[in-house]
Structures are given as structure tokens and as C-alpha cells.
Image: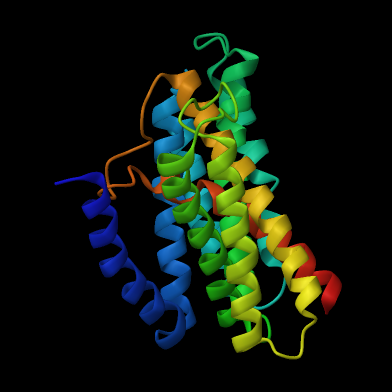
Amino acid sequence: MTIHMKRVIAALVGIPFLIGVIYFAPSWVFTILILFAALRGLNEFYSMMRPKAAEKTVLFNYLLTALLFCSLLVKGTFYISILPLFVIFPIVSFIVSYPKHYPKIGDIGQIIMGPFYICLPLAFLVIIATLPQGQMWVFFILAVIFAGDTCSFYCGRLLGKHKLTRISPGKTWEGALGGLTANVVSAAIFACLFFPSLSIVSIMVLGIAIGISGQIGDLAESMLKRMSNVKDSGKILPGHGGILDRIDSLLFAIPVLYIYLYLAH
């Protein structure tokens, strides 16, 4: 089966599933789904980077991730108190095991980086879903990012001639521009259909910001895979690779949408 067919089948299954969970299911179901994505993405990150740390240190971050998303089900800002623990617990673990397991600064950094790279942006997505019209804003960023990723992929394969960066030889300027165009067009169409009271210009600017940040997120994950000498972060999604391969653009785009909504409201 070709990669194209795998992507089509994944989309035909995944899109209705996401619509059902986001729009029809209780909010806690969406939170659990994002928690699963966070845990799986964190696991793929640690599998790629392979930090030399005790398994208990990594296990603490899995448990804290579950605690972070469970805290989002509680009204208020209790979740903020969880964030420092992602730094405190690993350092305490290294202190306890020292000098039996002599830590390197890179290992400590990788342990701490994972949750802030993966879990925190996804936590903001859950928060966005609780805002006024939050479900539609979740659909908005998914539509903009997925449209950009898809158009970038096919424009790059069909028209790509000029390499974008050495980090990812398969990416081209033609693909990047095609993806950015799809970001803006999809943002404008979505806004006309579901946010008619908003300025179309501001939404298009938001589409550009989300598109650029999403492409940077894609390149960031490509850099991590290149450093780790792996092609994909995992194999859970046919035609896409791992969870991290599918959400890499979202991880950098979600904070941009959150900032926009915070300033707008």
C-alpha cells in the first residue's frame, strides 16, 4: 500500500473520530484523548533522545503528565502548580542517585525538555476547548494545521525543486509556500463560516502566524529525528509515523492561538 493510500485511510478514520470526540463527547473524553497523545508523544521523545537516566526519573514525568491533565478537569489554575514539578522531580532524582549515576547536563536537559515541549502546548489545547466557542477554535487550529501539512506535503512532492533547509532534505520552499497558502485560505474559509463577527484580516494574519509556527515545529521535530538518526518518531499512525510526527506542527502553533485568544478576549 502506498504512503498516499495510508494517509487517505488514516484521514477517513481519524477525522470523524476527532469530530465525534471534540464536538459530541463530554469534555473529559477530549482531555483523556489529549492525555494519551501527550503520554505517547513523551514516550516517543524519550525513545528518540535516549537520555541516560534512571527509569524512575522518566516515570515521574509520565505520572506528572497524567496529574497535569487531570488537574485541568478542575476549575481554576491549579494546573500551574504542577509545572515546576517537571523540573524539581528529575533534579531530585539525580541528586538521590548521585554519584552512582553520574548525570550529564544534556541528560538532565532532555528529561526536563520533554514535558515542556510536548505536554504544555497540549495542555493549552485543552484550556482553549473550555473557552467561549472553544470547540470551534480547536477545530480551527486542526483544520489550519492539517490543511497546511497536507498541501505542503503534496506541493513539495509535485513542485519542489529548491531545498528549504539541510535539517530536512525532503522539505522545499515550494512546499513551504504551498502549505502557508493553505494555512491562510483554510483560516479565512473557516472564519467566514464559523466566526463571521471577526475581522477576516486578523484571521488571515493569525493563519500566517499559525502556519509559520507550525512549519518551525515541523522542522524542530525533524532536527530531533536527525540528531537521533531515526526516520519516524514511531509507527502508531499508518502513513504518518508516530504521534509526535503528526502533532509536531501543532505543538508550536497552539501557543500562538492561545496568545491570540487571550489578547482578543
Residue 155 picture location, percent across and down: 47, 47
Which image quadrant: the C terminus?
bottom right
Q: Which residue: 53% across, 43% down?
A: 175
Q: Which of 99 and 149 is in front in this view?
A: 149
Residue 136 picture location, percent across and down: 57, 81
Q: How many labels does the image show?
A: 0
Q: Which residue: 32% across, 42% down?
A: 241
Q: Nearer the viewer, residue 221 or 37?
A: 221
Residue 150 picture location, percent across and down: 44, 55
Q: Which of 17 and 160 is in front in this view?
A: 160
On the picture, is 229 further left or further right than 5?
right
Classify 146 as above or below 76.
above
- From this viewpoint, which residue is outermost toward the left? 1
Residue 121 picture location, percent across and down: 62, 54
Question: Which color scheme does this rendered protein use?
Answer: rainbow
Q: Which residue: 60% across, 78% down?
A: 189
On the picture, is 224 further left or further right than 15?
right
Residue 174: image quadrant is top right
Classify 9 as above or below 242.
below
Classify 199 as above or below 79.
below
Classify 2 as above or below 11.
above
Is residue 114 in sight in this rendering? no
On the picture, is 40 further left or further right than 144?
left
Is residue 253 in sight in this rendering? yes
Q: Which residue: 65% across, 64% down?
A: 184
- From this viewpoint, which residue is outermost toward the bottom? 197
